[in-house]
Image (spheres, grey):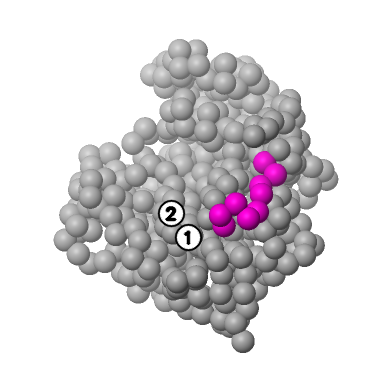
Amino acid sequence: MVEKYDLVIVGGGISGAALLYTVSKFTDIERVALLEKEEDIAAINSHHTNNSQTLHFGDIETNYTREKAEEVNEGAQMLAGYLENEDPDREIHSKRSKMVLAVGDEEAEELRHRYHDEGFSDLYPKLRAIDREEIAEIEPNVVEGRDPDTELLALQTPDGYVVDYGETAQSFIDNASGEDGIDVYTGSEVKRLDETDDGFILESEAGWFEADTAVVAAGSHSMQIAKEMGYGEDMSLLPVAGSFFLGNDLLNGKVYTLQMQKLPFAAIHGDADVHDPSITRFGPTAKLVPELERGELSTVEDFFDVFGLNVDSLLSYGNVLADRILLPYVLKNLVYDVPGVGKRAFLPHVKKVVPSVELDDIERAKGYGGVRPQIVDTDGKTLDMGEAKITGEGVIFNVTPSPGASTCLKNAMRDTEQLVEFLDGEYAFDERGFREATVGNFPEKRAIPADDD
C-alpha cells in the first residue's frame, strides 16, 4: 500500500521539524509526512551534545559582515520569540550574558571599528562596549590572572540565548502533530526518492509514499540524495567534525573570541552548558573527516557518493585546502584529537578566555560533537560560506551548516512560500500569523506585519 501526501519532509532534525511546524500550523496543506531515520527526533547534529548550543544573532560573530548579521538577526529573533512563548520556564533554553572578547591593543581596535564604524552598535541596541572592570563584574574568571597591562575590550549583551536544539525540534514536532493530516515516522530511513510524472515516490523503512512535493532536510545526506537525483552536480561537501573540552563552573555565560574572517567555522569560545551551568564547554575544534556523521563508519561510503572522486572535486579540495589560512588551521585541529598531546595543544585557546585554567582543569568531552557540512563549489573551486539550498521542480534540498539551526524558522518560512508555489496556489500560507507566533514574541520587538497582498 502506498501512502499519499501533499508534502513529504525527509529529516527530523531542527530544520525538518521547523518546516513541519510552519506548514502544519500556518498553511492549509492537507497531508504532510515527516520521515526520520533514527528512532528519536533530532538524534544527530541537532542533539544538544553535538552543537555549540548558540543562538546566533550576528552580534558577537565577528566573521559576519553587516549584511549577513542583519539576515541572521531576523531569523534568530524568530526562534527566540518561539522559545519565549513555548518555553517560558526555560526548560529547553536559557538566557544569559554573552560577549565577544578582544585581548590586546590590535584586537581591541578591530572590535571598536566593528562596533562604531561598521554600525553594529546601531543594529544591536543592547550590545555594549565594556572595559576590563565591567568584564570582571560579569565574568570574573575572564579577568582573574591576566596581565593587568593587557588591554581588554568586549562587546556584551544580556540577551544571549543558549538552546537545546534537539528539544526545540521535538517541540516543533509536538506542536505539529496535533494538527489533522500530519504524520511523523521515526526509525524510517529513506532508501530512494524518485521523480514521477505526478510528483515523487519514496521508498523507506516505513513503506512507500507518493507526494506532490518533497523537502530533503537531512544535513549532509541532503546533498547525497540530491546527487542521486541529478541535482547539485557543481557542489561537493567538506565535512567538518566539531568537538569540545569541558571544565567546571568557569563562566556565567558565553564568551567568544575574535573570529578569523576567512574561516566558516565558529570561533573558539567558552560557555555554560544549557542544562547544567556548572559545566563549561570550550570549543569547537574542527577536524576534516571523510564521513557524513561523526563516528559512523557506514557514512564513509556516503561521503564518497557526495565527493564523486572526479577531477573537479579533487581540484576543488586541493584549492580549498591550499589556502594559507585554512591549511594551518586544519593541521592544528588534527593535533587536538591526539591523546595527551591534544589537550596541551588546545590549552592556550582556553587560557585566552580563562587565563587561570590549568591542564588538569579541562578534559576532552567524550560523545560530544557532530559533523558540519561545508559547501564546496566545484566550478569555482572555492569554499562557500553559508548554507546550500538546491531547488528543483517540486523539490527542495537543504544543507544547513551553522547558523542553520539559528535561522531554522526563517528557512522554513521561505521553503513554505516555495511549496505553496509548487502546489499551484491550491493552498495559502498565513505569513502574518507565522510572524506573530515567532518574532512577534521576541522581547523588545513587535511582530513584523506581512504584506496584505
| Residue 114 can be seen in this image | yes
Residue at left 49%, top 46%? 402
Is residue 424 located in the magenta-colored stretch of the structure?
Answer: yes
Residue 47 shows which numbered tag? none
Q: Residue 1 vs residue 202: left or right?
A: right
Q: Nearer the viewer, residue 109 or 35?
A: 35
State whether residue 129 appears in this view: no
Residue 275, horizontal then vertical, whole percent: 71, 51
The amino acid type found where label 1 is placed reads Val
Start-end of magenta stretch: 423-431
| Residue 7 on image: x %, y % | 59, 64
Q: Quadrant of the N terminus?
A: bottom right
Q: Quadrant of the C terminus?
A: top right
The answer to whether 238 is drawn above or below residue 114 in the figure is: below
Q: Residue at x 37, y 68 (%)?
A: 229
Q: Residue at the far right: name it.
A: 89
Viewer-proximal residue among 216 and 280: 216
Q: Nearer the viewer, residue 176 or 118?
A: 176
334 horizontally vs 151: left or right: left
The secondary element bearing badge 1 is classed as: strand
Are circles 2 and 1 on residues that touch, CB within 8 Å?
yes
Q: What label does residue 391 carry, if any?
A: 2
Give the Cα separation between the discs numbered 2 and 1.
6 Å
Q: Check if residue 360 falls in the magenta segment.
A: no
Instruction: Please report the residue visible at 63 percent of the width from the left and 19 percent of the height from the top.
Output: 125
Q: Which residue is mark 1?
A: 395
Amino acid at dot 2: Thr
Q: Residues within 10 Å of mark 1 (few under 14, many from 20)?
A: many
Vertical order, 383 against 28 (above or below)? above
| Label 2 crowd bin: few (<14), some (14–19), many (20+), radius 10 Å | some
When asked about the image quadrant of residue 139, the answer is: top right
